[in-house]
Amino acid sequence: MRSRVDLHLVANTLKQLNDSAYFEQRLHEFTRHLIGAIEHVLDNPGKYDAAVEETFAKVARSVQSYLSGSTNNEVPYEVVYCLTDALKRWKLSEAVIVTFLTEDRNAHHDFHLRNSDPWLFIEAFITDYDPQGFKLPLVMIGVPRIYAHKPVFCVPLFHELGHFVDHQHSVSAVSMIQNSNLIGPQNGNELSHRREYFADLFAACFVGRSSIAALEAIAPNVSSSLTHPATADRAALVDAFLAGGSHPIIDLVQNALQALQLPTLTPIFQRVEVGADYDDIRTFVPASMEQVYGLFDSAWNYLFDAIDNNRNPWNFSSAKDGDIEVLTNDLTEKSIRNFAIRQAWDVASTGS
């Protein structure tokens, strides 16, 4: 009974969300199909086992919470804009990113990815419902609310997106088939380590060293565990990759990508220097999407160089760390937003 009540509540909430002006067309379609699946279960009591209904209710609630988070002005739209472009480069242009704002920045799952594809469950267990071939994948990411409009601090989301790409294309799983004993820790979970390494390398392709610098800030000196390699090992891998050096793990990942006929890992970002513009409190004007990605690494370095060296190029009477942070993140957010607006205008005006 509880599961059916939950499904009824979720369906009503989804109907309200589907009236949102914030949803793009694909999310409207996604929501409509999910409502259809829920109503199919509700209209056929006893048709499916109680365990199936209970699990389906959990899946639907999870999806609904992320969809709800994508209908307000707290969504990190500028970062999502970049993540969406990254997905297109990895043959996942059909995927849609939805966000959930977490409250506790110290929680274990601050920045996280939730793999909960309702269509796989529906296909396997809600067997008499016909989704008419609809299988739009959702990228469900969690973002600390405190960082929602702090793009410099959102670089871990590129790592999380790497997990989604890995999951969709089975990169790490294929690497296990090709070589099952190259990098695993003693008595550890080798597949988990490979997934973390791939996500680290994926993020570095787009935001340079800033993603691993964020890891070093969040989890310094963390040793290897069953699920994660040591922070020092992860940093060394990214540094080798960005320097163009060789590394067994890089070779392992590249071989798997080639076997899957996917893009090989290569830096996408173009290095830029935001210092002159930010010193004058002006936005940086990227000439390409590659330079937009370069903004993250440059802004990260600018922010912490200013804090660590007590720089005050703006002649503030007292430039506190908080002032430097606000200015850097605000200028970065506006720089990305301005680029996105220009691109949308170009598309609208040229029709291409």
Image (spheres, helix red, strand yellow):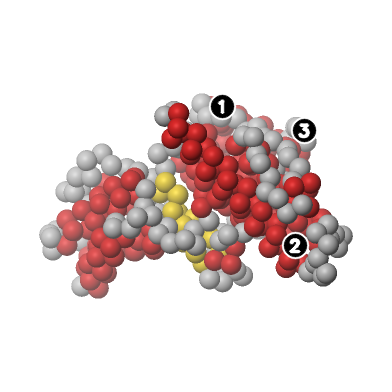
Q: In the structure shown, which secondary structural element does the residue marked by tag 3 occupy?
A: loop
Q: How many marks?
A: 3
- What is the three-letter code of the residue carrying label 2? Ile
Residue 151 placement: quadrant = bottom right
The Cα atoms of the two marked residues, 1 and 3, are separated by: 19 Å
Rounded to the nearest whole Å, what is the CA distance between mark 1 and mark 2? 43 Å
Give whichever of discs 1 and 3 has the lower sequence position: 3
Amino acid type for the residue under numbered disc 1: Gln
Disc 2, SS: helix
Q: Nearer the viewer, residue 267 or 301?
A: 301
* Residue 4 placement (x, y as % from top left): 22, 68
Residue 184 image position (x, y, % from top left): 65, 46
Which residue carries the number 2 mark?
Answer: 324
Quadrant where the C terminus is found in the figure: top left
Tag 1's secondary structure?
A: helix
Q: Residues within 10 Å of mark 1 (few under 14, many from 20)?
A: few
Q: Residue at x 42, y 46 (%)?
A: 96
Q: Quadrant of the N terminus?
A: bottom left
Q: Are marks 3 and 2 in contact (CB under 8 Å)?
A: no
Q: Which residue is mark 1?
A: 258
Q: Which mark is residue 319?
A: none
Q: Is residue 327 above or below residue 290?
A: below
Task: Determine the CA span between mark 3 and mark 2.
Answer: 34 Å
Query: Which residue is found at the position 77% from the left and 67% from the top?
Result: 321
**Mark 3 lies on residue:** 245
Q: Which mark is first along the chain, 2 or 1?
A: 1
